Image (cartoon, grey):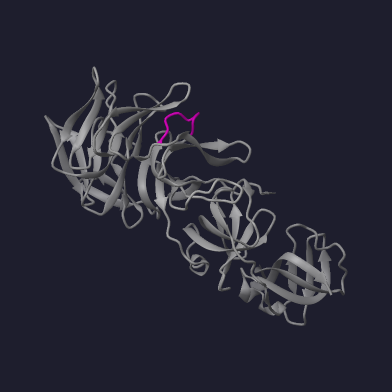
Amino acid sequence: MILYRSRSTYCLLIAVCVAMVLIPVVPACAGVDYSTNSGGWKQSLLVSGNYTSVAASMNTSVGPCFAALSTGGVDYAYVDTSTGAYAMAPLLTGTTYVSLTRDLTNGGHLYGARADGGIDWITWSNTWVATPLIGGNYTAVCSDLKPGVGGCYCARADNGIDYIHKGSTWTADPLVRGTTYKDIAEDPVSLGSIYAVRADGGIDWIHYSGGWVATSIMAGNYVSVAANSSPSGGCYAARADAGVDWIHDSGGWTATSLGVEGKYLDIAGDINNTGFIFGAATHESVTIAVAKTRAAGTHVQCTGTVTALLNGPFQIQATDGTAGIRVIPNRGLSVAQKGYSATVLGELRTMASGEKYIEIPQLNSFTQAKAAFLSPVTVANSLVVSKAGLLVQTTGTVTGKSGRDTITLTDGTVPSLKAVDPWRFVGYGISVGNSVTVTGIAGYETIGGSLSPVILLTDRKVN
């Protein structure tokens, strides 16, 4: 394992599927984002895992959110003090939940709609326990915010919404009928009211006015809805095609795009940070070449063979040699293995040189499978820039040394080549005037407005 220090802190929580060598294998599927607004909306990848539904935690000592695994069970997010990175740990195992919501009457607890349609109350009593409350055919659940009332609202698979509450026993009372809803969320501004995504993708506001009324407030192609806990009110709604809108009443109901690009299975408002959003997301898989054309800040998933371990970061390359890209863990330990095929999911960023790289949030944000080693492409020094991202090999005469980590060499072409060793061993046993063959990742730096070739070394040989 290679220790790599933290580079930056993420703000958007996204559940992401992982499978790694040296840790349990989990199928790649979806993830969790955390979207924040600080001078503009931004989503960041916080943790990885095979998650399909999320719920905010009211108990910050437990962690910022809970997430339901598509394979069964519930995890919670926490900060791993050994790495400073967010990680996920099991809360419950076994039961598959299609929807989770916080229990606002009992802080830190949850309601969950099971895959078989029943409702559980998930509580802590020396250990986490899932208590079945009621059977049914429910597909989504949200909390009741009315003070001192408790219980939850549950969307039925056939149509309508029930109010699940406890009298002498847990009871399901009909709230509304006639419309089928895909997802529901509490309205924190008008306590006891609900936002709901209809089967046709539109949004209803369900409220009490001498009787329960479902008012259509927005047409669209939405799949999930979340409460907006800020005073601005309204709700957030995830679009089926990707992105999140703020649905609000400003003299008429309006949908304003937040500029958040994720494609979400489920979203939930963050109760501890007003107005922010958690989201269980799916991600489009693209080639490395396509990923490098995307704008910085875009989340991408791509697959390539690991061609170099760079003292924390690592490099992946398309097997057809069309493109390669750096992968830099935001925090934690990189356990990438050279010669393995790796699928990574992270945020595109730009180096000072202008090269793109993918920043992954922590050590378990990529999957690996045994593959074949890729051979370097032999090039002249002057062609290194054009092969940026690829594993290359070139030969030249050493013209200078700088410390233990850098040499310059030339094969007679212009400009001369800089070879940098992330492990700081290149200077040993090499003298100016030696002919050397270097292998590594092609790249460049900008000097005087021009691109100058650089290789990050993986190997070198004195001829």
Q: Is residue 212 above or below residue 308?
A: above
Q: Is residue 55 above or below residue 220?
A: above
Task: Answer left or right for 102 relative to 340.
Answer: left
Q: Quadrant of the C terminus?
A: bottom right
Q: Main secondary structure of the magenta part?
A: loop
**Position in image of residue 152 (x %, y %):** 28, 30
Residue 46 magenta: no
Residue 61 magenta: yes
Q: Nearer the viewer, residue 371 or 363?
A: 371
Q: Is residue 13 above or below residue 412?
A: above
Task: Answer left or right for 73 relative to 333.
Answer: left
Is residue 448 among what the camera can see? no
Q: Nearer the viewer, residue 234 or 51?
A: 51
Q: Is residue 310 above or below residue 441?
A: above
**Position in image of residue 160 (x %, y %):** 18, 39
**Position in image of residue 278 (x %, y %):** 41, 43
Is residue 86 among what the camera can see? yes
Magenta segment boundaries in residue numbering: 56-63
